[in-house]
Amino acid sequence: MAAATLTRLSKPYSSSLSHFRRFISSSSSSSSAAISSETTNPPSSPFTFNNTTALSRKDPKDRNVQWVFLGCPGVGKGTYASRLSSLLGVPHIATGDLVREELASSGPLSHQLTEIVNQGKLVSDEIIISLLSKRLEAGETKGESGFILDGFPRTIRQAEILEGVTDIDLVVNLKLREDVLLEKCLGRRICSECGKNFNVASINVKGENGNPGMSMAPLLPPSHCMSKLVTRSDDTETVVTERLRIYNEKSQPVEEFYRSRGKILEFDLPGGIPASWPKLLEALNLDDYEEKQSAAA
């Protein structure tokens, strides 16, 4: 099973940060080093990769995991990564959230990011890695170690950089049929007051042509948030369709990058959270772990 590829951190957290800083420094020293995520054939990474280190798997409570969640926009990476983050006690770092925080900050990147996001394009490697570097630095000062990355890497270039600075234990590739993905994305809402994410879409797809049916109940907010729900500016049918096209064209090679290294776990979501969460835990060999955590609580 793919989950057997889990390994313990073998590089210091601060060492990874120094490599990130080195990349940002070299990138900012010359405009030619600003590499777009839409580059089809990226140049080789400035780091030396070492994929030979593989320590024996240990129980999750005895180590800090370094996981990556892949999948099309709207598939549920944040939902499941956040749940696993709480279960395993490691930070969930979503690059999409980092971008939105920067947008809300009115910082120097805000205007540039607004144009990119509203057009459904991918943010450049330089910007994403800069935001991620700052997030890791902030976590380091708080004593964090390990992580569950959501939304990074999205390109081979990003995967090579990440591979060069740290050891990824496992890559969880979430899959969901595209018509359901589109409906999910159009149903997403955010509370303008508390910032939490909800979904008003009630999905009920009948099985046909050998494909099973699928049901997903809406994730509705509490009553005090209901009147404060807003739709993300990039959650329009045109933008979502473009984001899915870009993902399929540019980001799916990342799946093969990790598949060839034996680090990927393919997981087809069978439905909403009630149906998918127990099966995901089972695929990760964490179903017994959750029961032990619940019993100890």
Image (tube, grey):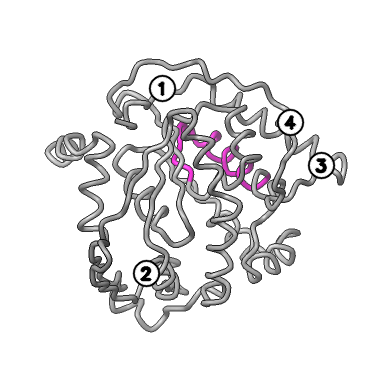
Earlier-in-chain disc, 3 versus 4: 4
Closer to us: 118 or 131? 118
User: How many callouts does the rendering have?
Assistant: 4
The Cα–Cα distance between marks 4 and 2, rounded to whole angstroms, is 38 Å
Earlier-in-chain disc, 3 versus 1: 1
What's the residue at 42%, 80% (across, down)? 228
Q: Residues within 10 Å of mark 1 (few under 14, many from 20)?
A: many
Residue 266: which quarter of the image? top left
Q: Secondary structure at mark 1?
A: loop
Earlier-in-chain disc, 2 versus 1: 1
Q: Pointers 4 and 2 in contact (CB under 8 A)? A: no
The Cα–Cα distance between marks 3 and 1, rounded to whole angstroms, is 33 Å
Residue 131 in magenta stretch? yes
Residue 113: which quarter of the image? bottom right
Q: Which marked residue is nearer to the observer: mark 3 or mark 2?
A: 3
Tag of residue 198? 2
Tag of residue 33? 3
Magenta-colored segment: predominant secondary structure: helix
Q: Which marked residue is nearer to the observer: mark 3 or mark 4?
A: 3
Q: Which residue is mark 1?
A: 8
